[in-house]
Image (spheres, grey):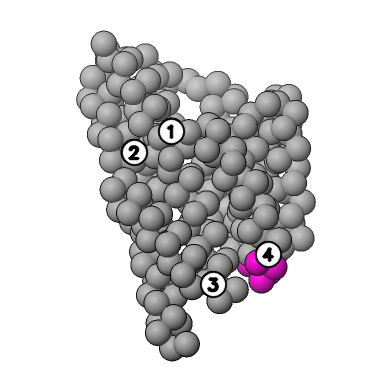
Amino acid sequence: MPESFLAEAKLAHRRGDLKCALELSEKGLAQGSELSSAKRHELWVLKSHCLSALGKWLESVRALESATQEGTISAEAEARLMMHRGYLMGSLARYSECFALLHRAELAARELGNSKLVAETLWRRGLISIFVGDYAMAEKCLRSSAEIALAEKDRSLEALSIAGIAKNLMYQERYNDAIAKFEEALKIFEETDSAFYIAVAHSELGNCYMFLGETGKALQLLESSAQVFLENGAMPNYQVNLAASATCSFGAEST
């Protein structure tokens, strides 16, 4: 059945099999009028997520634009589109557009009384705030996101928010504090069987250990996570890992 493509694509995306999730999304969209406009909207958004993780950000933006054309969408779906588009603008370093869209998405989510959507938006705003060096705003957004996720019993979002807090600490060179938080997030990723995010946590831990001079431990974590990224087509993550591994290996040879 056409709707099975959406369910299977969601499962593939959840376990981090990006290439499979993208393929299933495209197969679902190829069904044409056999799917409702709401389901096609979900498939376009999921396709956008996959393309973004694969480093194809402009194609990801176009997928979101296609999602807006799938008939009338709910106020919640519209807020989510603003959130996703805002985050993508951040990935493209278009920060003014990014923060404007995320602000609008947060306001819309609050008006809808949708706490989980508020938390998802804050998580994304927190991550982009790290990249622009606004660590105080990142801390505020990510802690709020984690608190809401805990209250809503959304373990996946809670782990992502905690990992965001850890990343914020890492960017401030507080590596030991960051490691403790990444380990906290990792436990939840393991509980929820989130293989891709387990690899992400390992990669981030590897970077922390590298900066602490523990090159052996760092290389082990970086190499194991790089293999997961390569298998799943997450080339931006893979390339970052390769660069970190090369730096780590050079440091080990120099000592």
Which mark's residue is nearer the viewer, 4 or 2?
Answer: 4
Labelled disc at residue 14: 1
Task: Provide the residue span drawn in magenta.
Answer: 171-176
- Asked whether residue 59 is drawn in magenta, I would say no
Identify residue for label 2: 17
User: Which is more foreground, mark 2 or mark 3?
Assistant: 3
Q: Earlier in the sequence, mark 3 or mark 1?
A: 1
Q: Residue 60, located in which quarter of the rendered image? A: top left
Q: Which residue is mark 4?
A: 176
Circle 2: residue type: Asp
Query: Separation of disc 2 and disc 3 at Cα?
Result: 31 Å
Instruction: Identify which residue is drawn at 49% across, 65% down.
Output: 217
Q: Nearer the viewer, mark 4 or mark 1?
A: 4
In front here: 45 or 228?
228
Residue 203 in sight in this render = yes
In the image shown, does 150 or 250 lie closer to the viewer? 250
Q: Residue at x 45, y 59 (%)?
A: 221
**Residue 234, relative to residue 239: is it above or below?**
above
